[in-house]
Amino acid sequence: MVASSPTPVASDPPAFGSYVLDRIGNTPLLAFRRIIPKNPHVQIFAKAEWCNPGGSVKDRAALQIIVDAERRGDLRPGKTLIDSSSGNTGIAYAMIGAARSIPIELVMPASISEERKHIAAAFGAKITYSDPYEGSDGAIRLVRKLVAESPDGYYYADQYSNPSNWLAHYRTTGPEVWRQTMGQITHFVATLGTSGTIMGTGRYLRERNAAIKIIGVQPDDALHGIEGLKHMESSIVPAIYDERQLDAKLLVTTEEAFATARRIAREEGVFVGQSAGAAMAAALRLADTIECGVIVVIFPDSGDKYLTTSLWKIQDWSI
């Protein structure tokens, strides 16, 4: 059974404006003028997920996880929500926690961008940093240790195993993509991290049209530099990930992801993060292999969370 969708925080709507959490979802679909497929019969559109109030696609999953946990009674007064995160989900938890007076504790790799660290802290989250060389897997191992030491004090959200993660996209992202393309989508492309976005959106789209192709994108190597993404073959595989749901998996190098993100900024005026660059690089490659189609690709976040990384250090790339 699919869990019910998140509900507004307050029962009475304000006379003007809207509550911040009511702005999660319903992100725009962007078209492009210069970075387009060579084949005029193939179109690429991008879902601008930085338009969520926490700045990323992860707002959707974090809200669903919290609402479902509260409904079950797993997250209640006196409990602290704890989870590991490479950045965006942690920021989303922290933002929602601030809006709903829920204490949040995060375990994040020390190697993540300074911007992500500061944003999560700005919302009031308590942060413990894991080994920078162990990435998201190291954060997972450390959060499990902390929960085992104090099980009664925490609600362990466990985004990598929590079905509310993909359910959020089944209930929101999938229907939005279907509606925004008027059902004409032929291919859906998303990067692989927790895999919630592609698992949930893909399930919904396949129910509407079984011919839609679901394409996963991951780094080509275990020692990659694309924050938030998993090289599945060398990582702790998320329990919610089911590779059988994918029609193909495309590999992208860190250099290709960075170069494409920079192209998107310079040629389209759209400032995106490195995972969006990876997704677009894969979508362009996919476009060269099909005769016609409508490709929708997820842009998880904007570039402003990576200003201090090599992605946007001007001396690292030609102007």
Image (spheres, rainbow, N blue to C red):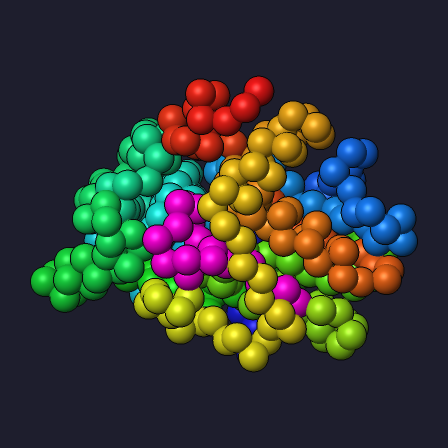
Q: What is the residue that sits farthest to the front in this orientation?
A: 318
Q: Is residue 222 magenta?
A: yes
x and y percentages locating residue 5 in the rendered image? 57, 60
311 up-or-down from 68: above or below: above
Q: What is the residue that sits farthest to the left in this orientation?
A: 149
Residue 273 falls left or right of residue 247:
left
Quadrant containing the C terminus in the rendered view: top right
x and y percentages locating residue 293 in the rendered image? 83, 59
User: Residue 114 is drawn in which quadrant?
Assistant: top left
185 up-or-down from 19: above or below: below
Quadrant containing the N terminus in the rendered view: bottom right
User: Residue 150 is drawn in which quadrant?
Assistant: bottom left
The answer to whether residue 82 of the structure is visible from this angle is no
Instruction: State the residue in front, 8 or 85.
Output: 85
Q: Is residue 96 magenta?
A: no
User: Going 51% across and 32% down the picture, which residue do you hit?
Assistant: 303
Residue 104 falls left or right of residue 272:
left
Q: Main secondary structure of the magenta part?
A: loop
x and y percentages locating residue 270 in the rendered image? 65, 30
Instruction: State the residue in front, 72 or 309.
Output: 309
* Total numbered labels placed on residues in the image: 0
User: Going 31% across and 35% down the picture, which residue do you hit?
Assistant: 117
Instruction: State the residue in front, 259 or 123.
Output: 259
User: Going 56% across and 48% down the picture, which residue do you hit?
Assistant: 278
| Span highlighted in magenta in the image | 214-231
x and y percentages locating residue 144 in the rendered image? 20, 63
